[in-house]
C-alpha cells in the first residue's frame, strides 16, 4: 500500500492510510490479533450496552491498538481501559471509541473532522469507515508521533495537523461529521459553523468531573442536542480554555 508523507509542522499536514497490512513495510505480523478479537466479541459486541453497528465492530477488529500505545504498555492494549500516552494525555478506552464512532453514524463518503488526535487510534478507526479524516492535535510531539505511526500503518486518507483545534479546519470545511475527543465547557462556535447541514457532531462538554457526551444534528441551521453518556475526558486547552475564563 502506498504511503506518502507530505510533511508535518505546526501548520503542516500528513497524508496517512486505509489500514495496516500484515507483512507490509513497517508492519509486523500481528501477535495481538486474538486478544483484539476477544475484546470485540466479549466486551464491545456483548451485553445490554453493546455496540450494534457491524461496520464499527469490524473496524475495531482491524485497527491494531497495540501499535498506537507506548511499547511498554502494549501488553495492556486490549484491556478495555484508557492508557497514558505521555504529555498528560491518554488513549481512550476502546468501548468509548466504539460508542462515539457508532453515535457519529459514519458513512463511506463522509469527510470527518476530529479534534484531539492523541495517539491516532480514533482517527484510524474512522479512516476504516469514511472517505477522509481531518485530525488536529494541539500537543505537537503527540501529533508528530501519531503522524509517524499512522504513516507506518499505511493510512493514506488521514490529514493531520498540529495546532489548536478550537477553530477547526475552515479551509477543508464543511464536514459531514465532527468528533471531539477533549472536553470544552461549551461547544466551540467555529465547529458548529463547519458542520454541514444535516451533519452530526459527537463532543464531550462540561467542566472536569461533570462532563456529558453530547450528540448533535444540524437541522435547518440549528443544532439539535442530546446527552447520551456521562464521560471523563481531558479538557480542551488553548483558545477553549481562554474562552471559558
Image: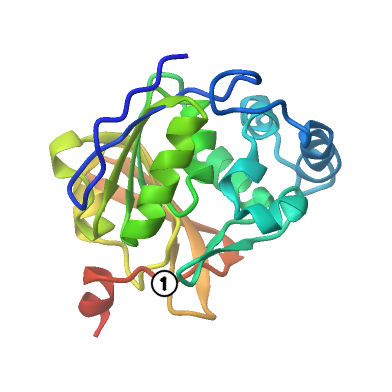
Q: Quarter of the image holding residue 8?
A: top left
- The colour scheme is rainbow
Q: Residue at horizontal 31%, vertical 43%? A: 218
Q: Residues within 10 Å of mark 1 (few under 14, many from 20)?
A: many
Residue 234 horizontal side relative to residue 51, left or right:
left
Q: Is residue 70 above or below residue 29?
A: below
- Front residue of 213/77: it is 77
Residue 3 horizontal side relative to residue 67, left or right:
left
Question: Does residue 97 appear in this view?
Answer: yes
Residue 81 horizontal side relative to residue 43, left or right:
left
Q: Residue at horizontal 28%, vertical 76%? A: 241
> Where is residue 178 shown, x and y percent of the image?
36, 44
Task: Kindly identify which residue carries mark 1.
Answer: 235
Q: Residue at horizontal 50%, vertical 36%? A: 124
Residue at the farthest bottom position: 245
Residue 155 horizontal side relative to residue 66, left or right:
left
- Front residue of 57/10: it is 10
Residue at the farthest left position: 171
- Front residue of 173/143: it is 143
Q: Residue at horizontal 19%, vertical 35%? A: 172
Quarter of the image with the C terminus is bottom left
> Where is residue 29 shown, x and y percent of the image?
71, 25
Q: Is residue 128 above or below residue 206?
A: above
Q: Is residue 9 above or below residue 15?
A: below
> Where is residue 104 shown, x and y percent of the image?
48, 40
Q: Is residue 132 above or below residue 40?
A: above
Question: Does residue 105 appear in this view?
Answer: no
> Where is residue 13 shown, x and y percent of the image?
24, 38
Query: For the image shown, how many numbered marks are present on the structure?
Result: 1
Amino acid at each position: 500500500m502506498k504511503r506518502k508523507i507530505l510533511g508535518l509542522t505546526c501548520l503542516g499536514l500528513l497524508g496517512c492510510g486505509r489500514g495496516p497490512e500484515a507483512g507490509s513495510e513497517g508492519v509486523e505480523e500481528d501477535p495481538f490479533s486474538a486478544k483484539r478479537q476477544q475484546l470485540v466479541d466479549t466486551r464491545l459486541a456483548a451485553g445490554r450496552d453493546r455496540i450494534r453497528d457491524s461496520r464499527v465492530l469490524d473496524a475495531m477488529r482491524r485497527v491494531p491498538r497495540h501499535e498506537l500505545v507506548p511499547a511498554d504498555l502494549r501488553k495492556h492494549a486490549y484491556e478495555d481501559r484508557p492508557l497514558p500516552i505521555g504529555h498528560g494525555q491518554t488513549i481512550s478506552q476502546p468501548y468509548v471509541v466504539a460508542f462515539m464512532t457508532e453515535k457519529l453514524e459514519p458513512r463511506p463518503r463522509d469527510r470527518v473532522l476530529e479534534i484531539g488526535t492523541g495517539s491516532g487510534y480514533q482517527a484510524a478507526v474512522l479512516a476504516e469507515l469514511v472517505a477522509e479524516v481531518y485530525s488536529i492535535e494541539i500537543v505537537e510531539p503527540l501529533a508528530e508521533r501519531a503522524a509517524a505511526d499512522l504513516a507506518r500503518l499505511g493510512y493514506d486518507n488521514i490529514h493531520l495537523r498540529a495546532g489548536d483545534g478550537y477553530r477547526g479546519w475552515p479551509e477543508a470545511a464543511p464536514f459531514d461529521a465532527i468528533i471531539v475527543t477533549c472536553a470544552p465547557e461549551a461547544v466551540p462556535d467555529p465547529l458548529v459553523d463547519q458542520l454541514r447541514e444535516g451533519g452530526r457532531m459527537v463532543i464531550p462538554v462540561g467542566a472536569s468531573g461533570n462532563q456529558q457526551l453530547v450528540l448533535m444534528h444540524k437541522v435547518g441551521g440549528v443544532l439539535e442536542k442530546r446527552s447520551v453518556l456521562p464521560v471523563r475526558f481531558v479538557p480542551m486547552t488553548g483558545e477553549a480554555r481562554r474562552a471559558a475564563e
